[in-house]
Amino acid sequence: MLLWLSYVVMLSLYSFAFGSYGSTFFPEVIQPIMKHVCICGVIVIFTLLNVVGSRAVGRAEKWIVGIKIIILLFFSAAGIWTIKVANFMPASWVSPIPLIAGGMIIFVAYEGFELIANTANQVQHRKKTIPRAYFTAVIFVLILYIVIAMITVGNISNLAEVAKTFLGQFGFVLITIAALLATASAVNATLYGASRVSYIIAKDGEMPKVLEKQVWHKQNIEGLFITTAITLLVANFFNLSSISTMGSAGFLLIFAFVNISNVMLAKSTQSKKFISMIGAIVCFIALFALVWQTAKTNPKNIWVLVIMLGLSFIIEGIYKSITGKDFKRILDPNLKENQAKNLD
């Protein structure tokens, strides 16, 4: 439940960012209105695309991401020559805790990688395809992020304004379009992954049985619409500056326990315990740094994480009390098969 709530937070953040960038193409007097029009528009359009099916989502994502990467590579090639080395000198550095906390706030930029796992059941030859997808995507994105961060820090703080300094108004528009494509693809992929998480939760008895219907198994309609409705509400009416920070904290907490779970299931997953243990420790350290810095700078934001955690337990508790279902050990059929092999 916490994972799904975190998805809603991230979807709201992505769509809000899309609305903020999209509204800049309209006259200033109507920008506040057009921002909400763009927010609602991007959510509704990609919800309808998800209704069509996974192939439509995949085709749209390929085109959006392809164009976005071309723009960012062009930006990187043009901007690498304008970097001011003085901006990287120790005099401009900050202390470690705020630096780590800042990194964890933008941790949502990497959240999308785990969406790959949510769609594993629909991937052919997943034992080979999934690892290949992870390694190639993570390595490429890390390199691209580092280059873009260097160009941004080496010039000024805003990416679109950086492009404007060496490419003029054309550069500003180009990077704004890239930002629109980036946030749109994030909404598209997260809606796709979040709806499948909702189905898994329902199938495991954590949500009403109606969400496990066969038609929903194929297209995830009910879970998709529920996610869309709540995202529209949060994106348009909530303060996302505080929500986004604790959304990252929610993901860090989830990923820490996912790593701990894999330590316990290492034989079944045929993985290395120490890698998952390191992952759990790093997640907890990063979570501590983020919460510590937030407590110092804006302690009210901590309540967002508390509310998210509380809602997760309350919703599950109410549902369990109504249905009389107990928590149960849930294991993927493939892991069960691996366990049987290990016992043999």
Image (cartoon, rainbow, N blue to C red):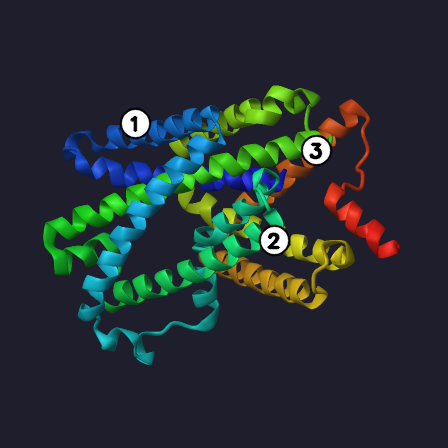
**Residue 30: where, in percent of width, then height?**
19, 29
Q: Which residue is mark 3?
A: 316
Q: Is residue 50 above or below residue 184?
A: above
Q: Residues within 10 Å of mark 2 (few under 14, many from 20)?
A: some
Q: Amino acid at mark 1?
A: Val
Looking at this view, name the residue that lies furthest to the right: 344
Q: Earlier in the sequence, mark 2 or mark 1?
A: 1
Element at label 2: helix
Q: Which mark is residue 255?
A: 2
Sequence-first tag of 2 and 3: 2
Contact (CB < 8 A) between labels 2 and 1?
no
Q: Are marks 3 and 1 in contact (CB under 8 Å)?
A: no
> Relative to 71, does residue 288 appear above or below in the rendering?
below
The reply, left or right, for residue 306 in relation to residue 170 is: right
Question: Vertically, is 231 above or below 69?
Answer: above
Q: How far apart are labels 2 and 3 at the CA level?
A: 20 Å
